[in-house]
Image (cartoon, helix red, strand yellow):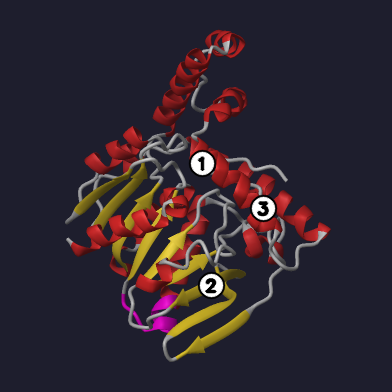
Amino acid sequence: MKAWHWMVITVCVLAAPHPSVAQSTVGIEEAGFVTLGGIEQWITIRGKDPKAPVLLWVHGGPTNIQSPFVSVYEPWTEQFTLVQWDQRGAGRTYYKNPGPPEAVSLEQIARDGIELVEHLQKRLSVQKVILAGHSWGSLVGVEMVKQRPALFDAYIGAGQVNSWRDTVKWQYEYALRKAREAGDTAVVQELEKAGLPPHDDRLKYFAMRRRFAAYFPKVDADWIAGEQKLYAAEPGVTPDVLKAYAAAGAFSGSRLLPAIMSTDLNANTTQLSMRVCVIQGELDTFTPTPIARAFYDHVQAPQKYYGLIPGAGHFAAMTHGREFLKEVAQCLAK
């Protein structure tokens, strides 16, 4: 299977759905389908303290689902009731609802997310939740909190998206610099000849991206490689499941790429009416840290917090989970 990341565009390999529910007096563990936006969508709810704040984790990708990674997110369940959601067009949700006529768009996914929060209000008897969005999920998350701010206690952006145009320029300059440092003369000549790809030309962008990918920080390259093994190790994986989830990446990626390539939060998001945290890995090249910082500096909010995790990349929340959670605690304690 091949991983295709934008902010992170990924082809996922997952287990077939097998809903289960388990709850005790000291916590909660649930997994199953909930009807959102007219289709059944997969959610998991895990937490050790039923009184802990509810945190909804909105995955990136758009198909980089995280719900199977129980051990990776185990520390989160000590502080939060953690909700994971396989978005429309991704993961077990796509397995249940493959291909057209399912509508996949940023606007529809954000509406699905709002329905999910309304479901959680009833299911978990809470008024507000904390929304944490990673990469593509930070774009979905911003749309959700803008549409229904009263549902949210705080917004946390991890691998925070901002301007796609600025991201393309940064990545091109980064790839060119790294190629020169490595003495990759042929790559330097290729990049210089092609020039900065137009931000709205997908073919030229991905031609550059193939060269850029060679210079991912090792911490991110290792996570991506290991992630695919984690997916493949899930129980219930069959050739049909592999085929379906390969199709999910292509299906959602092609439909959502126009929304991705038109992203410019600095132009259309001036204010958010809840606490805002932006937590970045120092080495993030997918959603470059200087561009994420520009969004943080630009957006107005009642309270803001910026956290930087040294040595971490785009997947800081996964590879440096304890450090990430410390930054979250700092933000929420303000």
**Circle 3 or circle 2, nearest the eye:** 3
Q: Position of residue 189 (x, y in %)?
A: 57, 8
Secondary structure at badge 3 equals helix
> In this view, which residue lies farthest toward the right?
239
- Residue under numbered circle 1: 220
Circle 2 or circle 1, nearest the eye: 1
Amino acid under disc 1: Asp
Element type where label 1 sits in the image: helix
Which residue is rendered at x = 71% and y = 55% of the image? 99
Disc number at residue 90? none
| Label 3 with label 2: CB-CB less than 8 Å | no
Q: Earlier in the sequence, mark 3 or mark 1?
A: 1
- The residues bearing labels 3 and 2 have C-alpha atoms spaced at a distance of 21 Å
Q: Amino acid at mark 2?
A: Thr
In the image shown, does 129 or 70 lie closer to the viewer? 70
Name which residue type carries label 3.
Answer: Lys
| Residue designated by label 3 | 229
Query: Quadrant of the rendered structure where residue 285 is?
Result: top left
> Does the rendering let one see residue 15?
yes
- Say if residue 9 shows up in the picture: no
Query: Which residue position holds label 2?
Result: 44
User: Start and end of the magenta stretch?
Assistant: 120-127
